[in-house]
Amino acid sequence: MRPLIGIPCAGNLSSHTHYRRFGVGQSYCRALELAGGAPVLIPLLDDEQTIPDIYKRLDGLLLAGGGDIETHHFGQKRLAKLGGVDRPRDRVELWLTRRAFADDLPVLAICRGVQMLAVALGGTLIQDIPAQIPGALRHDWHAGHARNYLGHEIMVERQTRLADILSAERTGVNSLHHQSVQEAPPALRVTARAPDGVIEAVEAPEKRFVLGVQWHPEELIGDDPRMARLFGAFVKVAASHQR
């Protein structure tokens, strides 16, 4: 039986008809399916027992990309460039991330997800890289580029889970973000950086599998088998301790 991997949705996505919906990018689901997992979308519901009831059935948690996290969760005041805040999503993801970490449930965190992982465990964020890091590389390659466009390289720390999975100390990645982890919490080790020093990956050495990356590997699995291995390693650990 495939392990169940929960993915919290983005909330209240609108359309031209003003019909409200929850949603997740298809690429995350397809990457998990190819790796042998069964993705389960988690809606941002209000009843305090619904999310725990869903959580009890999960074998792993994937934190996907999306908008910015509300700044009071990491003790800062809002800067002008903060946008796309989804408070129900913040609430649900903070609860799920902290519970999963405490229970040693496997976690793969991507883009906003790695930022949520850091914030949930006591870290802080850079709210806007261009405004806060003079001379930084361009990290937001949304406009005019495909989502698999390789925006810059990263340097991976040796003797880390990420290095073992990628089998590389340098690699090109896509880059679709304007925020990043500023200070990683004590429970997380920084395992990759961009050439300008921006944190690109973290992991929890004491856990079975807790790994976060700032790029979007789900958009690269057709181009780079190492990115498919990232999902494969995650799903393998989730499958080894199915509930």
Image (tube, grey):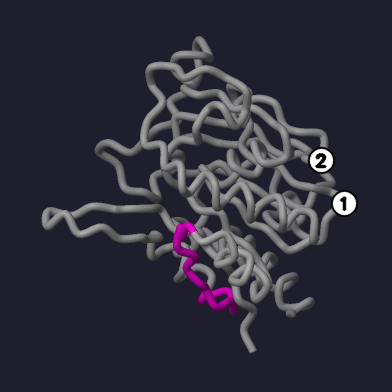
| Three-letter amino acid code of the residue under disc 1 | Glu
Nearest the viewer among 65 and 13 is 13
Where, quadrant-wise, is the C terminus in this rendering?
bottom right
Q: Secondary structure at mark 1?
A: loop
Q: Residue furthest top?
A: 134
Whether 123 is drawn above or below 59: the answer is above
> CB under 8 Å between callouts 1 and 2?
yes
Residue at left 37%, top 37%? 84
| Membership of 38 in magenta stretch | yes
- In the rendered image, which residue does mark 2 sit on? 187
Numbered mark located on residue 38 in the image: none
- In the rendered image, which residue does mark 1 sit on? 206
Nearest the viewer among 232 and 46 is 46
Image quarter of residue 66: top left
Q: How many marks?
A: 2
Instruction: Decide if residue 189 is on the left or right side of residue 227.
Output: right
Whether 179 is drawn above or below 234: the answer is above
Nearest the viewer among 143 and 22 is 22
Q: Residue furthest left?
A: 17
Q: Position of residue 54 (x, y in %)?
A: 59, 71
Whether 212 is drawn above or below 49: the answer is above
Q: CA distance from mark 1 to mark 2?
A: 8 Å
Which circle's residue, 1 or 2, is located before the other in the chain? 2
Q: Position of residue 98 (x, y in %)?
A: 71, 50
Label 2 CA crowd tier, 10 Å (few <14, some 14–19, many 20+): some
| Three-letter amino acid code of the residue under disc 2 | Ala
Which segment is the magenta one? 33-46
Q: Position of residue 1 (x, y in %)?
A: 64, 89
Residue at left 67%, top 58%? 107
Q: Residue furthest right?
A: 206
Q: Position of residue 63 (x, y in %)?
A: 56, 54
